[in-house]
């Protein structure tokens, strides 16, 4: 009886264990599938156990690099501002030179106009003298040939005398007076033109002198402003350089300190790694 009961119990145990094993395998397989599905929805995060020294080193290096980049950018910006100021000053000087050249051109035009009027006046005077000489010679030629010949023999000039005027009739005198009045009127008009041209030339010269004085004063002010801007930019540039040098020295000191700390840490790690080996060898 005992043998039969033990055999039936062992057979029941074996049947139960196989079913249980199969069930467990199914559970494990299902858990693996669930785990794989969950992993697909998860993101890998950084480890919590991070060296604090490395965390301190990275931002410091980044900040120093950013400081250097900002300093370089600021220096380039200051150089560009100085170039812009120089270009503006050159443009200002060129505009002033342009105004001076335009003023000189207007003065030259006024002088040219005055010279042309003067030339026309001289031409008219020459023509009038020639015409007057022809008329006087024509009116005197018939009545005073002998007298003129005698005067030529004696070396006198062919000028009109009172006796020659007495020989002229009333019509000739009226014509001479009319032509003289016409010439006088014409000469007065030309004199007025010359006076007006001279007044324009004088005004243009005065305006040119005034604008030249203003131009010189503007040049002086621009020069003083450029010198002041240059000195200011020079001081700023020197301050930036000193600041950069101080930052570089501080970075070098921090780098040396960091290297020293790393060396100390490496030495400590080497000591810690060497201690277990000595213990094992002693054992």
Image (spheres, rainbow, N blue to C red):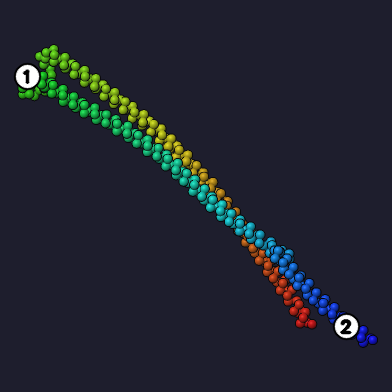
The residue positioned 56% from the left and 55% from the top of the image is 72
Name the residue carrying label 1.
Answer: 142
The residue positioned 24% from the left and 22% from the top of the image is 187
Residue 75 point in image, percent of width and height: 55, 52
**In the image shown, does 125 or 23 lie closer to the viewer?**
23
Residue 146 point in image, percent of width and height: 4, 19
Instruction: Give SS at disc 1.
Output: loop
Name the residue carrying label 2.
Answer: 10
The residue positioned 71% from the left and 74% from the top of the image is 270
Above or below residue 175? Residue 249 is below
Residue 167 point in image, percent of width and height: 10, 14
Q: Which image quadrant for residue 166? A: top left
Instruction: Give SS at disc 2.
Output: helix
Q: Which residue lies furthest to the top in this view?
A: 170
Relative to residue 280, is residue 57 drawn left or right? Answer: left
Above or below residue 252? Residue 20 is below
The residue positioned 37% from the left and 38% from the top of the image is 101
Residue 16 point in image, percent of width and height: 85, 78
């Amino acid at each position: 009886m005992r043998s039969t009961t033990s055999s039936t119990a062992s057979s029941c145990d074996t049947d139960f264990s196989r079913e249980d094993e199969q069930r467990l395998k199914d559970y494990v397989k299902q858990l693996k599938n669930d785990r794989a599905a969950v992993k697909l929805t998860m993101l890998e995060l950084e480890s919590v156990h991070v060296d604090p020294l490395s965390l301190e080193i990275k931002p410091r290096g980044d900040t120093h690099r950013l400081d250097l980049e900002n300093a370089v950018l600021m220096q380039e910006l200051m150089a560009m501002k100085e170039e812009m100021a120089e270009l503006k000053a050159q443009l200002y000087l060129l505009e002033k030179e342009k105004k001076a050249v335009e003023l000189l051109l207007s003065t030259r035009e006024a002088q040219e106009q005055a010279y042309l009027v003067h030339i026309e006046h001289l031409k008219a005077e020459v023509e009038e003298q020639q015409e007057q000489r022809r008329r006087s010679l024509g009116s005197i030629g018939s009545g005073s040939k002998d007298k003129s010949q005698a005067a030529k023999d004696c070396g006198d000039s062919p000028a009109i005398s009172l006796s020659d005027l007495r020989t002229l009739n009333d019509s000739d005198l009226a014509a001479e007076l009319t032509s003289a009045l016409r010439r006088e009127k014409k000469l007065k008009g030309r004199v007025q033109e010359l006076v007006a041209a001279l007044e324009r030339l004088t005004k243009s010269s005065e305006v040119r002198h005034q604008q030249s004085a203003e131009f010189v004063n503007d040049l002086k002010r621009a020069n003083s402003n450029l010198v002041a801007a240059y000195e200011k930019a020079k001081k700023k540039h020197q301050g930036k350089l000193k600041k950069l040098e101080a930052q570089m020295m501080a970075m070098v000191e921090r780098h040396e300190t960091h290297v020293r700390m790393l060396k100390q840490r490496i030495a400590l790690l080497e000591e810690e790694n060497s201690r277990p080996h000595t213990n094992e060898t002693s054992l």
